[in-house]
Amino acid sequence: MSNAADSYLDLPAGKTVFAEGDAGQTMYLIESGAVDIVLAARGKQPIAQLGPGEFFGEMSMLDDQPRFASAVTSESCRLLRIERTELADLLGQNVGIAIALMRKLAQRHQRCEMLLTDALGEAARLRKKPVLAPSAKPEPEAQPEPERAAPPVPREKASPKPAPPRRAEPPAPPAVAPSRPSCVLRHAQGESFPLDPSISEFLIGRPDPAAGINPEINLSGVDPTRSLSRRHAKLVRQGQLYFVREEAGTVNGTFVNNVRVTTGVDVPIKPGDKLRFGAVEVDFATA
């Protein structure tokens, strides 16, 4: 394997890492910064935006195919370059990187399946939409016959004044769907960790860019004793409910109201519960 220092690239913002159609013998792991994946057919709008702990370029390297898109740094970056000849040795030396690689590939595959399902559903909906028939040619209006003068009506028999027309009731406003409650984890030191209502799964732990681990809830700042595992636990949202699930390999335990949870089991939580991940204790509350 090449010298470790030679394997790192420090690039400024706006630098092209590789271009669409290039030969692919190398993949890259982002240690810091951000990279945009750009497809020529889609214009300048990136099809993906990647950050620390994520990798790119692996498809061309594994399949021996030209690059299907370009990779451009959107800010200053430090990248770990991994040649095809070095990959097997790297995975053998660091199982965490192998697991992270498989996990990322599985997530991307799942996302592609979801996008494909949405696209097929939209196509089916458009096929079922009724086609409006072309409007028929309007018939010429019939000329009204001249009105005949009505005989005079005696004063005492004049018809009463017509009643004023009833005012139409205004339509009721459309019902607004209830928004999902926003929740947060609060630490005694005053730090808060909000839970995005649009996300259904949050990894709790400490980051490890070399292994591709970048948790949504990074508690390392309130964990001076490093009691957290890198992939310690997950918060899972199902509808309006939240659950805690301890990840396999967690060393120092996960607790709900001082009761240790079983690894791999979803434990329901509610606002007011106290959660502990290793030595880090937080309150689960509504924002």
Image (cartoon, grey):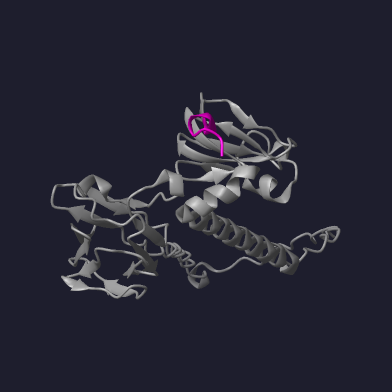
Viewer-closest of 66 and 177: 66
Residue at the image position 47 percent from the left and 41 percent from the top: 51
Up/down of 193 relative to 247, above or below? above
Viewer-closest of 262 and 192: 262
The range drawn in magenta is 1-8
Q: Quadrant of residue 37?
A: top right
Up/down of 89 relative to 165, above or below? above
Percent position (x, y) of residue 157? 51, 72
Up/down of 75 relative to 221, above or below? above
Q: Quadrant of residue 112?
A: bottom right
Percent position (x, y) of residue 98? 52, 55
Viewer-closest of 136 and 258: 258
| In magenta stretch: residue 4 | yes
Quarter occupied by the N terminus? top right
Q: Is residue 86 left or right of residue 210?
A: right
Q: Residue furthest left?
A: 188
Quarter occupied by the C terminus? bottom left
Percent position (x, y) of residue 184? 26, 56
Q: Is residue 204 left or right of residue 137?
A: left
| In magenta stretch: residue 208 | no
Percent position (x, y) of residue 161? 47, 66
Residue at the image position 60 percent from the left and 59 percent from the top: 109
Q: Is residue 57 visible?
A: no
